[in-house]
Amino acid sequence: MIPRIAEKTLHRYAKGFPVICITGPRQSGKTTLAKLAFPNKPYFSLEDPDTALLARSDPRGFLETWPEGMILDEAQYIPELFAYIKTMADKEPVPGKYIITGSQQFNLMGKITESLAGRAAFLTLLPFSLSELVSAAVYEIGNGDYLWELMLKGLYPPLYDRDINAQDFYSAYIASYVERDLRQLVNVKDLSTFQLFIKLCAARTGGILNLSSLASDCGIAHNTASAWINVLETSGIIFLLRPYFKNFGKRLIKSPKLYFTDPGLACRLLGISTSEQLFLNPLRGSLFEGFIISELQKNRLNRGEIPELWFWRDNTGMEIDCVIGNSGKLSVVEIKSGKTFNEDMIGALLKWQKLGCEAKRILIYSGYQKAIHKGINVVPWKEVTNL
């Protein structure tokens, strides 16, 4: 079993909060993490019909039967339970008493913020990070050109603890989780239209989100496209990188950029089945960009931090791939999929210096040599674990 960095965060939360909520995409390892971090707590899945019936028919009795607390998996299925958990937490505010997990963040988070404000700590768990795979010796941090293999395979936990082909996993994932869960929450009259929509999103990875264009290409209304994007984002399938526009007088781009949380899922939707196809694909750079930014997100979420990540682009087309905030200090990052360093990779970073906004400048590329060039930190992709 591959240890999760977020386990330390859960133990920290368990010292001060009576309720801990773990959310994230399907198959990101939430249940496994909860059981591993709290092995002595009884576990109940509210997807199980018998358990759900018991919790719904007698919520107070259900909770009081296990006074030491419990792990409640897929808790969004019984939203009325949260009011009783609140009562229990107020009556006996024992730290770390209730561990709640849920895949459908949009349902779960709303109910918890309403019922458990000030009583619950939140952790978003995404698929494995590169740090976790390296620590478990799945991949070596030193030499070894496994980047495209890793991106094609993706980082969902079942791919590393089961004997399962990545193509088979993603086909089942799309059918069993993406379509099943999301269709329950959006008005999808035609499944093929929704499938097309997700594929069109994959084809736009790394690009500025244009809902009008996306809706037109899919043959749906603008409002429908907006609703579907919101559901894909809040369910952890995609993430939207918002623009950074503080302290600038120039007109800046205000629309977000669209990325997939996991590169393996994006590759499957794009029909990429080999590392050679990935390397030659026109979207290679955008997929690599999304992979790196997703890793930056995971590094922060696993520590219980809110990721301060943006991109920057002005109306002339000058762009910085990622702006990182850290206690008021900025780092600006360019991400290039080329393996050989050249001056063109740092053009935007050199221009940034002229804007007069103080920031550490970083280039992340797919090569292996670390250097400082013209005041810019040149960082191999494997060292994203340290940023």
Image (cartoon, grey):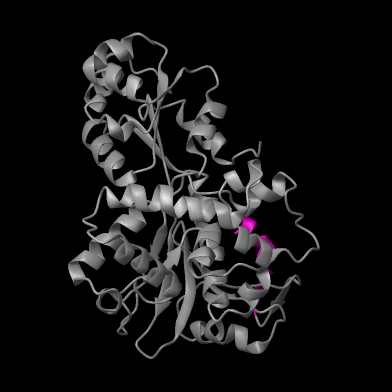
Vertical placement of residue 112 versus 232, above or below = above
Image: magenta residue range: 375-387
Residue positioned most to the bottom: 316
Vertical placement of residue 206 versus 374, above or below = above
Residue 378 lies in quadrant: bottom right
- Percent position of residue 105, x then y: 34, 44
Vertical placement of residue 361 versus 346, above or below = above
Vertical placement of residue 229 versus 135, above or below = below
- Percent position of residue 373, x then y: 69, 80
Would you say residue 154 is visible in this rendering? no
- Percent position of residue 20, x then y: 40, 31
Q: Is residue 257 left or right of residue 303?
A: left
Observer-nearest of 353 and 348: 348
- For image coordinates 47% across by 51% down, the residue present is 173
Q: Is residue 44 left or right of residue 137?
A: left
- For image coordinates 46% across by 48% down, the residue present is 305
Does the magenta portion include 269?
Answer: no
